[in-house]
Image: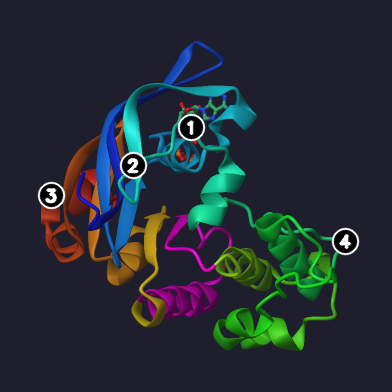
């Protein structure tokens, strides 16, 4: 298996509740260091693909019925989600799931605890790398003592990405970071996503409804329909092909 692909998904099938087939032989790769956009209409199976990769399917009674998923050339099948996080694979779920009753800083501490399995106050335990997060999200530094529940939608999205960054991941699965944000905030978040990729070499698999912004930062992209990939190509090609724009991306 080629390890210049940080992620290789080969022919996977996913079934929910033993009846709903959400993925029907889906394959894709994320070349190391690149941002790959995963696009397609509602219900195409984008979130399911990310959950299959991070191992979170089981939480929703979904099963991986066929196919293989290789992270750094190794099968993810025998690994719990937490082990995958420790190995460098972070999943930022749709809807910015932060701990609303904890402060920004406590959210980052919780992420570190989940990563190391030890409280950061324990003797010799690793400390949360707040600076790494605040470097990209100075706004979170300003709000570090505030409850996450009082942050704006954009700030919560920043915190969700910040918590993923704490693990210093090689690959981030990003589910709809633009959801519910103003155009200005979407631009800010995507500028930071591009910076994290460029400066840290972090690979990303980016699920988005907003194809325009996704293809602007991505190197390549896949378009899904009904549980499988129907088109793939460089981001440039997908963004400029009139047929792709009209029929698959609803961009006329
Ligand atoms: P969206 O942008 O709306 O989230 P998506 O492309 O991410 O769309 P998925 O959420 O992956 O699509 O859903 C793919 C299919 O699987 C849909 O038919 C959906 O109804 C079904 N599905 C998703 N989650 C579950 C679940 N927990 N139980 C049963 N069916 C599910």
Q: CA distance from mark 3 to mark 1?
A: 41 Å
Label 3 SS: helix
Q: Which residue is mark 1?
A: 78
On whether residue 185 falls in the magenta region, the answer is yes
At a point 48% along the width and 58% down the height, the residue shown is 88
> Would you call the spot at circle 3 few (<14 residues within 10 Å), some (14-19), or many (20 or more)?
some
Q: Nearer the viewer, residue 51 or 68?
A: 68
Q: How many marks?
A: 4
Please name which of the two marks, 4 or 1, marks the residue nearer to the observer: 1
- Earlier in the chain: of badge 2 and badge 4, it is 2
Q: Which residue is mark 4?
A: 101
Instruction: Classify residue 195 by image quadrant.
Output: bottom left
Q: Which residue is mark 2?
A: 70
Q: Report whether residue 188 is seen.
A: yes
Say whether mark 2 is within 8 Å of ligand 1.
no
Quadrant that contains the C terminus: bottom left
Label 1 SS: loop
Please name which of the two marks, 2 or 4, marks the residue nearer to the observer: 2
């Amino acid at each position: 298996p080629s390890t210049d692909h940080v992620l290789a998904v080969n022919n996977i099938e996913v079934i929910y509740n033993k009846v709903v087939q959400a993925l029907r032989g889906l394959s894709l790769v994320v070349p190391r260091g690149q941002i790959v956009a995963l696009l397609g209409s509602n219900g195409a199976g984008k979130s399911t693909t990310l959950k299959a990769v991070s191992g979170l399917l089981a939480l929703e009674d979904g099963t991986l019925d066929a196919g293989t998923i290789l992270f750094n050339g190794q099968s993810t099948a025998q690994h719990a989600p937490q082990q995958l996080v420790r190995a460098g694979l972070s999943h930022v779920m749709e809807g910015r799931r932060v701990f609303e009753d904890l402060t920004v800083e406590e959210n980052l501490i919780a992420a570190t605890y989940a990563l190391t399995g030890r409280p950061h106050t324990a003797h010799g335990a690793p400390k949360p790398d707040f600076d790494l997060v605040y470097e990209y999200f100075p706004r979170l530094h300003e709000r570090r003592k505030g409850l996450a529940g009082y942050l704006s939608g954009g700030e919560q999205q920043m915190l969700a990405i910040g918590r993923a960054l704490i693990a210093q991941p090689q690959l981030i699965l990003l589910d709809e970071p633009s959801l519910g944000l103003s155009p200005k905030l979407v631009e800010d978040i995507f500028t930071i996503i591009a910076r994290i990729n460029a400066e840290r070499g972090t690979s990303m698999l980016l699920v988005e409804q907003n194809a325009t912004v996704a293809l602007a930062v991505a190197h390549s992209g896949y378009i899904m329909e009904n549980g499988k990939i129907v088109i793939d190509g460089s981001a440039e090609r997908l963004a400029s092909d009139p047929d792709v724009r009209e029929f698959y991306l609803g961009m006329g």
